[in-house]
Image (cartoon, helix red, strand yellow):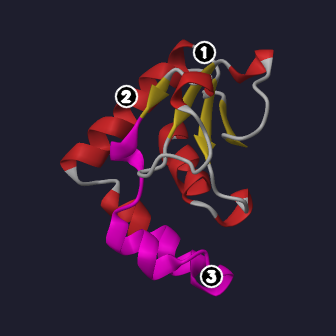
Amino acid sequence: MSRAVDVRVRRVYQEPEAADGTRVLVDRIWPRGLAKATAELDEWCKDAAPSTELRRWYGHDPDRFPEFSRRYAAELTAPTPQAAVTHLHTLAAAGTLTLLTATKELEISHVQVLADAVRG
């Protein structure tokens, strides 16, 4: 039986913690006001982020989150995003993985859907 992977979700603007493990930014757009030199992340995995069209449609409207989640989960089955999810799962299998986003409301963010996909 395989062990459960430890996938965490945090805002990229929060101070890194020792327990974060591998820190991966999963936004398509670089976070505003964050210098790349001081970002303290291990990778930037744009291919795991929702498409620009889906992100714009969603607009972080809480009423649209269920439909957004369904559409985003479907996007994650396409070859390029699926390869990104597989890569993230491999990172998580090696130790704690923290998915980072600039989104303010983590509960209705793509990272929740992505974290579930990575956990498998």
Q: Position of residue 71 (x, y in %)?
A: 40, 71
The answer, for residue 1, to whether it is visible in the render is no
Q: Residues within 10 Å of mark 3 (few under 14, many from 20)?
A: few
Amino acid type at image mark 1? Gly
**In the figure, 84 relative to 20: above or below?**
below
Q: Position of residue 32 (x, y in %)?
A: 58, 51
Amino acid type at image mark 3? Asp
Region in magenta: 45-70
9 is within the stretch colored magenta: no
Q: Are marks 3 and 2 in contact (CB under 8 Å)?
A: no
Q: Are marks 2 and 1 in contact (CB under 8 Å)?
A: no
Query: How far apart are the two marked residues, 2 and 1, measured between alpha carbons?
Result: 13 Å
Give the farthest residue toward the left. 79
Give the numbered dot on residue 87.
Answer: 2
Residue position marked by numbered label 3 in the rendering: 61
Q: Residue at x 56, y 48 (%)?
A: 31
Q: Residue at x 36, y 33 (%)?
A: 86
Q: Secondary structure at mark 2?
A: helix
Give the numbered dot on residue 71.
Answer: none
Q: Identify the image quadrant of residue 20.
A: top right
Q: Position of residue 60 (x, y in %)?
A: 60, 74
